[in-house]
Image (cartoon, rainbow, N blue to C red):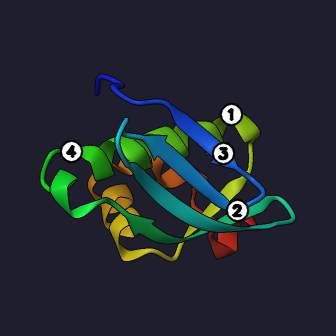
Amino acid sequence: MEKKHSLVDNAAEKRYELDLGDDMALIEYVLGRGLIVLTHTEVPEQYEGQGIGKELVQAVLEDIRTKEIKVVPQCPFVAAYIRRHPEWMDLVLTAENK
Protein backbone atom coordinates (compact mmCIF):
# COMPACT_ATOMS: atom_id res chain seq x y z
CA MET A 1 0.00 0.00 0.00
CA GLU A 2 1.31 3.41 -0.95
CA LYS A 3 1.93 5.71 2.00
CA LYS A 4 0.16 8.98 1.48
CA HIS A 5 0.37 10.53 4.94
CA SER A 6 2.97 10.74 7.70
CA LEU A 7 2.59 8.87 10.98
CA VAL A 8 3.59 10.37 14.32
CA ASP A 9 3.83 8.47 17.61
CA ASN A 10 2.53 11.13 20.01
CA ALA A 11 3.72 9.47 23.22
CA ALA A 12 2.55 12.39 25.38
CA GLU A 13 -1.05 11.82 24.23
CA LYS A 14 -0.60 8.02 24.01
CA ARG A 15 -1.71 7.82 20.42
CA TYR A 16 -0.47 7.39 16.88
CA GLU A 17 -1.53 10.22 14.60
CA LEU A 18 -1.86 10.24 10.82
CA ASP A 19 -1.67 13.80 9.50
CA LEU A 20 -4.38 14.29 6.87
CA GLY A 21 -3.52 17.94 6.25
CA ASP A 22 -6.77 19.48 7.44
CA ASP A 23 -7.53 16.79 10.03
CA MET A 24 -6.08 13.75 11.77
CA ALA A 25 -6.79 10.04 12.08
CA LEU A 26 -5.55 8.32 15.22
CA ILE A 27 -5.08 5.11 17.16
CA GLU A 28 -4.99 5.40 20.94
CA TYR A 29 -2.83 3.00 22.92
CA VAL A 30 -1.62 1.88 26.33
CA LEU A 31 2.05 0.97 26.49
CA GLY A 32 3.18 -1.87 28.74
CA ARG A 33 6.41 -3.75 29.29
CA GLY A 34 7.23 -5.24 25.91
CA LEU A 35 3.74 -4.71 24.55
CA ILE A 36 1.28 -2.13 23.30
CA VAL A 37 -2.50 -2.32 23.59
CA LEU A 38 -4.26 -0.60 20.68
CA THR A 39 -7.52 0.58 22.23
CA HIS A 40 -9.33 2.85 19.78
CA THR A 41 -9.14 3.92 16.14
CA GLU A 42 -10.67 7.15 14.90
CA VAL A 43 -10.96 8.37 11.32
CA PRO A 44 -12.72 11.68 10.61
CA GLU A 45 -16.13 11.12 9.04
CA GLN A 46 -15.25 12.91 5.79
CA TYR A 47 -12.38 10.41 5.27
CA GLU A 48 -14.32 7.21 5.93
CA GLY A 49 -14.32 4.70 3.08
CA GLN A 50 -11.13 6.11 1.53
CA GLY A 51 -8.63 3.61 2.96
CA ILE A 52 -7.34 5.97 5.66
CA GLY A 53 -8.04 3.47 8.45
CA LYS A 54 -6.14 0.74 6.62
CA GLU A 55 -3.25 3.09 5.91
CA LEU A 56 -3.16 4.09 9.58
CA VAL A 57 -3.24 0.54 10.95
CA GLN A 58 -0.55 -0.64 8.54
CA ALA A 59 1.74 2.27 9.44
CA VAL A 60 1.21 1.65 13.17
CA LEU A 61 1.94 -2.08 12.82
CA GLU A 62 5.10 -1.30 10.84
CA ASP A 63 6.24 1.00 13.66
CA ILE A 64 5.45 -1.62 16.28
CA ARG A 65 7.43 -4.20 14.32
CA THR A 66 10.50 -1.92 14.31
CA LYS A 67 10.18 -1.52 18.09
CA GLU A 68 10.13 -5.32 18.47
CA ILE A 69 7.21 -5.36 20.89
CA LYS A 70 3.96 -7.33 20.89
CA VAL A 71 0.53 -5.90 20.19
CA VAL A 72 -2.82 -6.51 21.85
CA PRO A 73 -5.45 -5.46 19.27
CA GLN A 74 -8.24 -4.45 21.66
CA CYS A 75 -9.75 -2.13 19.05
CA PRO A 76 -12.17 -4.09 16.82
CA PHE A 77 -10.99 -2.28 13.67
CA VAL A 78 -7.34 -3.20 14.31
CA ALA A 79 -8.27 -6.79 15.23
CA ALA A 80 -10.28 -7.17 12.00
CA TYR A 81 -7.40 -5.73 9.95
CA ILE A 82 -4.96 -8.24 11.45
CA ARG A 83 -7.39 -11.13 10.81
CA ARG A 84 -7.62 -10.07 7.14
CA HIS A 85 -3.84 -9.61 6.88
CA PRO A 86 -2.25 -12.62 8.66
CA GLU A 87 1.26 -11.38 7.87
CA TRP A 88 0.87 -9.24 11.02
CA MET A 89 -0.14 -12.14 13.32
CA ASP A 90 3.45 -12.58 14.54
CA LEU A 91 3.09 -9.24 16.36
CA VAL A 92 0.00 -10.30 18.32
CA LEU A 93 0.57 -11.25 21.94
CA THR A 94 -0.69 -14.79 22.57
CA ALA A 95 -0.36 -17.26 25.42
CA GLU A 96 2.38 -18.98 23.43
CA ASN A 97 4.57 -15.91 22.95
CA LYS A 98 4.25 -14.08 26.26
Q: Is residue 21 above or below residue 89?
A: above
From mark 2 to mark 3, how far is it between C-alphas? 9 Å
**Mark closer to the chain start, 3 or 1:** 3
Q: Position of residue 41 (x, y in %)?
A: 42, 66
Front tag of 4 and 1: 4
Which mark, residue 35? none
Which mark, residue 13? 2
In this orientation, does residue 87 appear?
Answer: no
From mark 2 to mark 4, how far is it between C-alphas? 24 Å
**Mark closer to the chain start, 1 or 2:** 2
Q: Amino acid at mark 2?
A: Glu
Q: Position of residue 94 (x, y in %)?
A: 62, 70
Q: Which residue is mark 3?
A: 9
Front tag of 2 and 4: 2
Q: Which residue is mark 4?
A: 51
From mark 1 to mark 2, how far is it between C-alphas? 21 Å
Q: Which residue is mark 1?
A: 66
| Horizontal side, residue 24 vs residue 29: left or right | left
Q: Provide the secondary structure element on which disc 1 rests.
A: helix
Tag 2 and tag 3, C-beta contact below 8 Å = no
**Mark closer to the chain start, 3 or 4:** 3
Q: Is residue 11 above or below residue 13?
A: above
